[in-house]
Amino acid sequence: MNTRLNPPMKLAIQSLLAHGPVDAAAIDKFLKTHSFPLIEGRNATFVYRGPGDQVNLRHWVFGLGSSQPFTRVGNSDFWYHTLELPPQSRVEYKLEVILGGVGTWIRDPFNPNLAHDPFGANLVAHGQGYKTPGWTEHDPEARPGTMVETQLENTPLGTQRVSIYLPARFRESRRYPLLIVHDGGDYMRYAALKTVLDNLIHRLEVAPLVAAVTHPGDRIGEYPNNPLHAAFIAEHLLPFMESRYPLYAAPAARCLMGASFGGVASSRPRGAIRARSGGCSCNRGASRSPTSARASADRCSPGSSSSSTPSARTRASRATRSI
């Protein structure tokens, strides 16, 4: 058995700096001969070139400080930061450039990979060996579910649009779990919610379910601890879904899902829904990503509770609780 330890990998940025003072020509060559972020084993090197008094990596990595400072190379306009990025991982980030006491968040000009969301776009860095999960992409073998559009009139929030997902081979003669999705249009547009549900049901990873996809008019006003929104969910949407579709009434078969304020909005209706159905599961603080869409679908399964069902692996920082 070979017990010798392998020497640590010398990173490209270390090789650049090892040759003494780095001039503009060496920086130009370094940038031209590599793509960024530069992935070397478990290490990712981010770079910035331009004016600035300070540069920070602003990211969404659970357990790591959200602002990581870059190092300036000498007195040049070239900056870098290296962090450990586990294999097969995926990270979203932006760069913060501080100049004259003013900080500006910008996209990384050296990275063309973008992840779009309702607020714009973030840059994406992939760990070595990353592959897009197959269950987030169209599977020609998966039977597609059906989307039904409807409107609920005279609710405490006025007329509300609701998109309803019915699984493939939906039958009136059987019962289904219910998933209520806050910011549902964003999950459909940016997180491929319908594709995720089609694939997970096809792969028998979740039970066939019915999803009520909501579309807020003013989420900032409706979602944060608003009794009118709670009344809409518990006294209008839920009774409507129960009257139209064969749903399980068990607590483990009712799930509320939301991101950010949508997660907050999932908290207020808990008591009213408990009174109607004995409880439900509540996925709070999830990101609007295909991974969080899967996590919530995993939890919406009859015969299990949110305290006993293992959470799907998710890169989003989230909390799940029973109600």
Image (tube, rainbow, N blue to C red):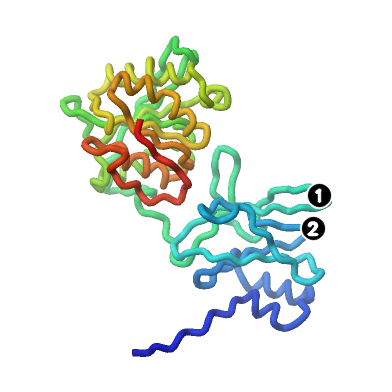
Residue at horizontal 76%, vertical 77%? 22
Quarter of the image with the C terminus in it:
top left
- Residue labelled with disc 1: 101
Say which of 273 and 163 sits in front: 273
The secondary element bearing badge 2 is classed as loop
> In screen coordinates, is 316 left or right of 277?
right
Residue at horizontal 42%, vertical 56%? 132
Quarter of the image with the N terminus in it:
bottom left
Say which of 272 and 175 sits in front: 272
Amino acid type of disc 1? Answer: Gly
> In screen coordinates, is 181 left or right of 242?
right
196 is higher (above) or lower (below) than 180: below
Amino acid type of disc 2? Answer: Asp
Q: Is residue 311 visible?
A: yes
Q: Which of pointers 2 and 1 lies earlier in the amino acid sequence?
A: 2
Residue at horizontal 23%, vertical 35%? 302
The x and y percentages for residue 270 are 39, 25
Q: Are marks 2 and 1 in contact (CB under 8 Å)?
A: yes
243 is higher (above) or lower (below) than 176: above
The secondary element bearing badge 1 is classed as loop
- Residue labelled with disc 2: 53
Count how many numbered circles sit on residues in the image: 2
The x and y percentages for residue 32 are 67, 71
Q: Is residue 147 visible?
A: no
The x and y percentages for residue 320 are 39, 39
Most distant residue in the left direction:
173
254 is higher (above) or lower (below) than 85: above
Say which of 140 and 177 sits in front: 177
